[in-house]
Image: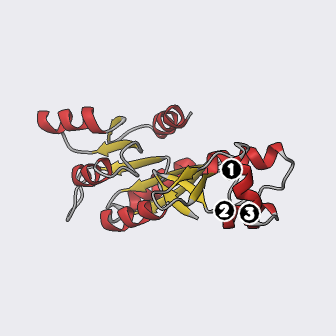
Amino acid sequence: MNEQFGERTFTTFEVARLCGVFHTTVINWVNKGKLKARVTPGGHRRIPLSELVPFMKKYDMPVPADIDDPHRHVMILDDEPMMTRLIDKGFAKYKDRYVVQVSNNPVDALILVGKRVPDVLVMDLMMPVMDGFQVCQILKSSPATKDMKIIAISGRKLTAAQQDFLAKNVDQFFQKPFEMNDLVGAVDKLVN
């Protein structure tokens, strides 16, 4: 399994294992247009998750739960553990819709994003070592994460330059303290 352009992709061998067929059968499905795939510069086929799951359902193949996850993934990044716990607890009421990952360190958060791009990042702007503005610049400069939805939060008054940066780079901003229902509502709008 690979991450390509922020979406999970599979090799023909991986798809063959999931579908219980030979990998040459998967290649034939792709060549006949039954299953859409991207082709790498080296000529290898990569099947996006968004194509694989509907294909498997169409042909009544069992879809493993680990690839057919109906939950949206939300990452919370704040250097204050109390704040991440509060937001995590706020999302706990919506376990049927959201899986929440928490990080109190921007570097760790970027590593986690590299492993799996969340649907939405809820991020504090004022953190030591690396602030939310720097994290945002890193994410927006990468093709794999440039379209990721970001909600910024802060307890400090922002300068005009910071407000301008946010207007261009994040999807929403919340001033602390904020209502948890408002944050969940904003996430709902961004992922649906």
Amino acid beneath label 1: Val
x and y percent of residue 65 in the render? 74, 58
- Provide the secondary structure element on which disc 3 rests: helix
> Disc count in the image?
3
Q: Amino acid at mark 2?
A: Thr
Whether residue 111 sits left or right of residue 46 in the image: it is left
- Determine which of the numbered discs, if any, sits on residue 24 in the image: 3
Q: CA distance from mark 2 to mark 1?
A: 9 Å
What residue is disc 2 on?
12
Assess whether mark 3 and mark 2 are in contact (beta carbons under 8 angstroms): no
Residue drawn at (58%, 65%) of the image: 1
The Cα atoms of the two marked residues, 2 and 3, are separated by 8 Å
Binning the other alpha carbons within 10 Å of mark 1 as few (below 14), some (14 to 19) or many (20 upward) gives some
Q: Are marks 2 and 1 in contact (CB under 8 Å)?
A: yes
Q: Which residue is mark 1?
A: 30
Q: Earlier in the sequence, mark 2 or mark 1?
A: 2
Above/below status of 79 relative to 123? below
Q: Residue furthest right?
A: 60
Task: Tell me the CA gap for discs 1 and 3.
Answer: 10 Å
Please state which of residues 90 and 191 is positioned toward the viewer in this rendering. 191
Residue closest to the eye, 73 or 177: 73
